Amino acid sequence: MKAQKRLKCSALASLFVFSLLCMTISSLASHVSIGRYLSVAVKPQKIQQQLLQQSIQVKFPQNILTIKQAIIFLLQFSGYHLAPTQAMDQATRDMLNQALPEVDKIFGPMTLKQGLTTLVGHPFYLLIDPAHRLVAFQMKSLYQNLYDVPTTINSNPKREIIHYEYNKRM
């Protein structure tokens, strides 16, 4: 009887030791030792999986003059690219060709995604194509019909004035 009890206890103890050994081996497989008492998990970092969440702090060079150039500059090391502007609407193309505001020439710290949305402003959505790693923009519907089509006023034959009428549909 005592022999059976001892056998059961030793079997349970060996099973416990075996399970600890298996857990240790699996833990070692998912961690790499980088010091005597420190190990790190073997997995990609969050910013390696979510490329637009990387932190940026930028001072744009003097040759960056437009919003489009600034966006291309921000994306150059991110793995993403600006989608062809031919696929974007005219309002978005006009926005991309505007001068980079002086206040935006020094940027950050912020995420890349926040930087892109800050550059284009509140009236535009950021469109992300993760499969092709493309970034594009689209004007929000609230802002699309803010101004009527421009009308030309020719009160002076030497000078042409463009007049925009404010649309009160907002």
Image (cartoon, rainbow, N blue to C red):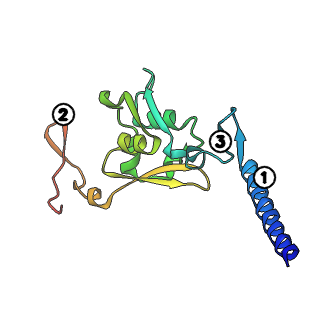
From this view, report whether residue 137 is shown above or below residue 119: below
Q: Nearer the viewer, mark 3 or mark 2?
A: 3
> CB of mark 3 within 8 Å of CB of mark 1?
no
Where does label 2 land, which residue? Answer: 159
Nearer to us in this view, 94 or 121 = 121
Mark identifier at residue 25? 1
Where does label 3 land, which residue? Answer: 40
Quadrant for residue 34, please give it: top right
Q: Amino acid at mark 1?
A: Ile
Mark identifier at residue 56? none
Spot the residue most to the front: 2
Q: Gap between marks 1 and 2, in whole Å?
A: 82 Å
Badge 2 local density, few (<14 within 10 Å), some, or many (20+)? few
Badge 3 local density, few (<14 within 10 Å), some, or many (20+)? few
Secondary structure beneath disc 1? Answer: helix
Spot the residue most to the top: 62
Badge 1 local density, few (<14 within 10 Å), some, or many (20+)? few
Q: Gap between marks 3 and 2, in whole Å?
A: 70 Å
Looking at the rendered structure, the number of numbered marks drawn on it comes to 3
Indicate the quadrant containing the N terminus: top left, top right, bottom left or bottom right. Answer: bottom right
Point out residue 8 in the picture as x, y percentages from the top left corner: 82, 73
Quadrant for residue 115, please give it: top left
Q: Gap between marks 3 and 1, in whole Å?
A: 15 Å
Q: Residue at x 74, y 57 (%)?
A: 23
Secondary structure beneath disc 3? Answer: strand
Nearer to us in this view, 60 or 147 = 60
Q: Amino acid at mark 3?
A: Val
In this rendering, position of residue 110 left or right of residue 143: right
Point out residue 48 in the picture as x, y percentages from the top left corner: 60, 44
Q: Amino acid at mark 2?
A: Arg
